[in-house]
Amino acid sequence: MSDILVIEDDPVIGAILNRFLSHAGHEVQIVQRLGAAREVLDSRDVDLILLDLNLPDGSGLELLRAIREDMHSTTPVMVLSGMRQEDHIVRGLRLGADDYVTKPFSPLELVARVDRWTRV
């Protein structure tokens, strides 16, 4: 069972992610703010981070930068974003995202991508 941290402020998307990922055998924790995400990441290791970029208390890109540069973490990070422009995708990947999925997304495709990173 993989431990996945989902950082997503939309409760509907969070519920969909929780349902599909839990059904696929993953342990899921959902937080809606960057501050809560930092608390989780400071207190324990996770196997994968699913990161929305537009959050109420800041940019997910800043958290991504901190994960890679400040925390020196190699935990896989998959960005989930409504930002579909090529420059946003390239910026996320260059900051250290391991994958970038645009919204709307197929929950089954997302689970397949998650399984690839977590080796379920």
Image: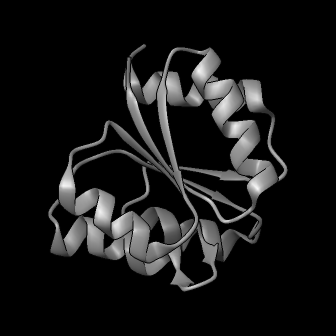
The residue under the point 31% across, 58% down is: 40
The residue under the point 38% across, 17% down is: 1
**13 with respect to 78 (left or right):** right
The outermost residue toward the bottom is: 58
Residue 17, horizontal then vertical, whole percent: 68, 38
**Display coloring:** one colour
**23 with respect to 35 (left or right):** right
Residue toward you, 101 or 10: 10
Residue 71, horizontal then vertical, whole percent: 17, 67
Residue 72, horizontal then vertical, whole percent: 14, 63
**41 with respect to 35 (left or right):** left
Q: In this view, does 19 lie above or below 100?
A: above
Residue 69, horizontal then vertical, whole percent: 20, 73
Count the labels in the image.
0
Residue toward you, 4 or 84: 4
Q: Is residue 113 above or below residue 31?
A: above
The residue under the point 50% across, 36% down is: 28
Judge whether residue 95 can be spotted in this image: no
Res 37 → quadrant: bottom left
Q: In this view, does 76 lie above or below 112?
A: below
* Quadrant (top left/top right/bottom left/bottom right) for the C terminus: top left
